[in-house]
Amino acid sequence: MRERLLRLTAPVLERPVVVIESDDWGPGPADQALALAALRERLLRFRDLAGNPAVMTIGVVLSIPDPAAIAATGEYRACLLDAPAYRPIVKALLEGERAGVFALQLHGMAHYWPENFLAFWRRDEAVRRWLAEDGWRTEKLPAWLQSRWIDAAHGLPSKPLPAEAIRRAVAEETACFARCFGRPPKVVVPPTFVWDENAERAYAEAGVEVLITPGRRFPGRDAQGRLLPADRSYRHGQTLASGLKCLVRDVYFEPALGHDPAETLAQIESKWSRREPALLETHRFNFLDGNLGDSLAALERLLRGVLESFPEVRFLSSRQLAMDAPTAAPLSARLQTAWRRLRG
Ligand SMILES: [Zn+2]
């Protein structure tokens, strides 16, 4: 009931809004640059009535572990996205942004907390093998290790990180983002949606304006590595004590996992029936390793369906949605929306 009441006060959209959010892009093989170029080309084919192309926000991971340096020193060392080897990837991201189809946002300096990674690397043979063979695919690490804002260096359950360590890490990652892309990030997606009040404050202090949430915050990992129960709820467009504005992303579109565009369209319809935006979550793995062709075809079916079913749709980035949502719905629509949101 509390969540329904929270939803009641969310902005009432004047027209349907679809945001496609894709996480985990970062240092790795140049295949990613090819996939990003293909995505740019495909997204440009679809425009809303205002002439804006379909937008995919890109949650960027700024570094991966450096296998040779870690093996040689036994200490944590990283390869950063601003290294010359990854220039094709950065170039593809910036070209997409210039074309208006990508909006770059911060996912994290790394898709883990480095001390957790190093401690696990020291004791786990599978992670040592992963690092030697496949050390850029952070999506293949154990789920708990992919959380960034937890201390699990001495095992699970996780503990909170000291506020000062989080503050330093956020300053480091926003500076690295600015080196890569020529400006600091304005939108952040906390990895695995595990974060706390200190991370929220640190993001805001570093100039971040928008926090992407799944509508809840998970404060850590239990003894089995599962997400701890949520410790708070969020609603669309809510301004937090830290000053961050938050959005709720809870529609899943992962074609490589079998998500059908028709089902995603039904979820967009359901969001629109309550005049809420549809933020779609999709990850880079859909567009790599032989999945690219099928996933692009699914994305194309989805976007064609969106334009047919919702001719008034607006394609926006998360930041545009948070800062300037199209909300001028007539009174009758507002009342109907309130009723639908209360019914849940
Ligand atoms: Zn991620």
Image (cartoon, rainbow, N blue to C red):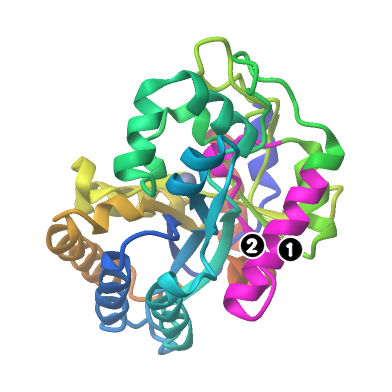
Relative to the observer, which residue lies in front, 186 or 109? 109
Q: Quick one: label 2, few (<14), some, or many (20+) residues within 10 Å? A: many
Residue 135: quarter of image: top left
For the stretch drawn in magenta, what is the main secondary structure? helix
Relative to the observer, which residue lies in front, 213 or 174? 174
Relative to the observer, which residue lies in front, 276 or 247? 247
Q: Earlier in the sequence, mark 1 or mark 2?
A: 2
Residue 213 magenta: no
Is residue 317 visible in the rendered image? The answer is no
Q: Is residue 237 above or below residue 233?
A: below
Residue 183 magenta: yes
Is residue 170 visible in the rendered image? The answer is yes
Residue 62: quarter of image: bottom right
Q: What amino acid type should be assigned to the residue bearing mark 2? A: Val
Q: Which residue is mark 1?
A: 209
Local SS, label 1: loop
- Give the residue drawn at x 68%, y 56%: 237
Horizontal side, residue 80 vs residue 55: left or right: right
Which segment is the magenta one?
A: 166-195
- The spot of residue 47 in percent (x, y) is 34, 83
Q: Spatial distance from mark 1 to mark 2, Cα to Cα? A: 6 Å
Q: Is residue 120 above or below residue 236?
A: above
Indicate which disc residue 187 carries: 2
- Residue contact at pointers 1 and 2, CB within 8 angstroms: yes
Q: What amino acid type should be assigned to the residue bearing mark 1? A: Glu
Q: Which quarter of the rendering shows the N terminus?
A: top right
Local SS, label 2: strand
